[in-house]
Image (spheres, helix red, strand yellow):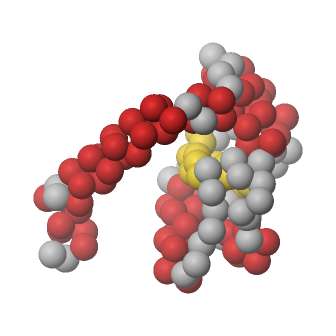
Amino acid sequence: MADHVKSIISSHFPNYNNLSVGIEIRYNFNPNDSSRLRKDVDMADLLTNNGYFPIYLIFSSISPREDAISRLTRGGWNFLIGNQAASFMNELLNVDITAILDVPSIREEIRTEVTSIMRELFNTYAFRQACGS
């Protein structure tokens, strides 16, 4: 399994150096504020400093903002956008994730679950300590 994953990653990222990977997945990418970009740059630093290869997947090819992507690339992220991102996931998992995510009932269930997870996360002791609240 590890060889399969490394092979797929290497085929998409020539600069991949057999590290573990950290993957950020977005369907739509529309960073409207510098705070979001700073957090993404910080996350790339955190991943890199802990021995991970940061990969950023954006499934929508109509939403990317080139200036933001350039900034995040300089910050350490390795991007795949649109069909390249979908192809990467398909090769990696042998599943057409975009077809699955287009099913309305699945999309709604994911939204519901993510909302629940985020509510729980924000109420944890660790989160409150990290945010000083």
User: Residue at coordinates 33% horizontally, 41% vertically from top-left?
Assistant: 113
Left or right, residue 1 beside residue 123: right
Give above or below for 99 relative to 127.
Answer: above
User: Which residue is at 58% across, 78% downward?
Assistant: 32
Q: Please tell me in which quadrant of the rendered image residue 66 appears.
A: bottom right
Farthest-out residue, front: 104
Query: Measured from the top left, where is residue 83 in percent x and y?
Result: 80, 42
Residue 14 vs 94, above or below: the answer is: below
Front in this rendered view, residue 80 or 28: 28
Q: Residue at x 76, y 29 (%)?
A: 8
Q: Residue 72 versus residue 107: which sits nearer the camera? A: 107
Q: Quadrant of residue 1?
A: top right
Where is 33 relative to 14, above or below?
Answer: below
- The image position of residue 58, as x and y in percent, is 68, 52
Residue 41 visible in rendering: no
Residue 70 spot, x, y in % from top left:
77, 72
Whether residue 34 is visible, yes or no, is yes
Image quarter hosting the C terminus: bottom left
Seen from this angle, which residue lies furthest top?
1
Counting from the top left corner in percent of width and height, residue 26 is at 59, 52
Taking depth in this image into account, of 132 and 123 the one nearest to the observer is 123
On screen, residue 96 versus residue 122, left or right, reads right
Instruction: Give the residue at x 55% y 67%.
Output: 40
Q: Residue furthest bottom?
A: 34
